[in-house]
Image: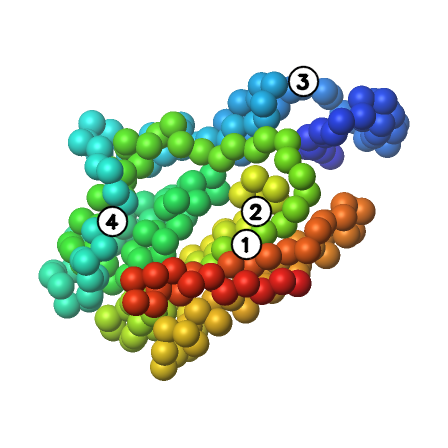
């Protein structure tokens, strides 16, 4: 039986004892400090850890034939609306699905891609040439941001979250897209961008639904921390509402 684990902490004596007990129970081999695992490159220094998937992203670009493409500064054009009637069906739908699936996997260390990828996922069954152009722009953005990733540094165990909703953003079914991100101290630990299941009559209703999903995620993480006997302070959740060109912060504390 193969056992793969990574042990970290601030008490070297406890770590040594844990490894000793695991050696007694399992046949194990210590490989030293973690540097590469499941396609994720891990760089550690005195400040913390940095996780990236530059090698995997480069492979995606090569699959699309865009390894030498010109990078762009933004993952998508905001005013571009994808529709099944925009143009003819894309000649290689399998390639489209493969690239979009790979981009979804890339969001493990690239939360900045979540919303843009969410916009191209609904067309996996019948992509058009226009949809593939959106994917190509996404890949051009990836080309210019290969060095991006996630940083984890020592910080307090304080949970906080932000949520937002793009009301009626889908021109086909008028459903809204919501997103949230959860921080443990200064470290981003959970994020999501999904289309809401119901059509809402107002942007306020869509925002509060997004906030409800965020609170559910916060509650689960808070319980998980309790299981690890990690105490967390009161959790602020911030929802952005755009009213008369001013941002209004709606605070919900759990």
192 left or right of 32 in image: left
Instruction: Name the residue located 33 percent from the left edge and 32 percent from the top edge.
Output: 145
Mark 3 lies on residue? 32
Of tags 4 and 1, the one toward the viewer is 1
First in sequence: mark 4 vs mark 1: 4
First in sequence: mark 2 vs mark 3: 3
First in sequence: mark 1 vs mark 2: 1
**Which class describes the residues within 10 Å of circle 3: few (<14), some (14-19), or many (20+)?**
few
Element carrying mark 4:
loop
Answer yes or no: do the residues labelled 1 and 2 have beta carbons within 8 Å? yes
Q: Nearer the viewer, residue 14 or 90?
A: 14
Measure how far apart labels 1 and 2 are at the Cα level: 6 Å
Answer yes or no: do the residues labelled 2 and 3 have beta carbons within 8 Å? no
Mark 1 lies on residue? 161
Q: Residue furthest left?
A: 87
> Picture coordinates of residue 236 (x, y %)?
59, 57
68 left or right of 221 in image: left
**In the rendered image, the vertical position of residue 177 relative to residue 198, given as above or below:** above
Of tags 2 and 4, the one toward the viewer is 2
Instruction: Name the residue located 36 percent from the left edge and 78 percent from the top edge.
Output: 202
**In the rendered image, the vertical position of residue 119 relative to residue 62, given as above or below:** below
Residue 183: image tag: 2
Element carrying mark 1:
strand
Of tags 2 and 3, the one toward the viewer is 2
Measure how far apart labels 3 and 1 are at the Cα level: 35 Å
> Picture coordinates of residue 31 (x, y %)?
67, 19
Residue 76: image tag: 4
Answer yes or no: do the residues labelled 3 and 1 have beta carbons within 8 Å? no
**Residue 19 shows in this picture:** no
């Amino acid at each position: 039986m193969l056992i793969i684990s990574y042990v970290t902490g601030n008490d070297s004596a406890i770590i040594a004892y844990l490894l000793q007990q695991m050696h007694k129970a399992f046949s194990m081999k210590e490989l030293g400090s973690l540097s590469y695992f499941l396609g994720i490159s891990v760089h550690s220094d005195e400040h913390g850890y940095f996780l990236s998937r530059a090698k995997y992203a480069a492979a995606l670009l090569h699959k699309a034939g865009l390894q030498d493409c010109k990078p762009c500064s933004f993952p998508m054009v905001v005013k571009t609306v994808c529709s099944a009637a925009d143009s003819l069906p894309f000649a290689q739908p399998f390639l489209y699905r493969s690239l979009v699936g790979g981009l979804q996997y890339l969001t493990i260390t690239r939360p900045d891609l979540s919303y843009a990828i969410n916009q191209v996922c609904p067309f996996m069954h019948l992509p058009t040439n226009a949809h593939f152009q959106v994917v190509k722009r996404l890949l051009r953005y990836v080309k210019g941001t290969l060095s991006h990733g996630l940083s984890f540094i020592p910080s307090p165990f304080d949970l906080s979250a932000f949520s937002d909703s793009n009301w009626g953003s889908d021109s086909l079914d008028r459903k809204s897209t919501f997103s949230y991100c959860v921080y443990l101290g200064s470290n981003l630990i959970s994020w999501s961008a999904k289309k809401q299941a119901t059509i809402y009559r107002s942007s306020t209703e869509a925002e509060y639904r997004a906030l409800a999903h965020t609170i559910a995620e916060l509650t689960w993480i808070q319980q998980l921390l309790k299981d690890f006997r990690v105490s967390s302070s009161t959790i602020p959740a911030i929802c952005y509402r755009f009213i008369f060109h001013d941002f209004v912060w709606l605070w919900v504390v759990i």
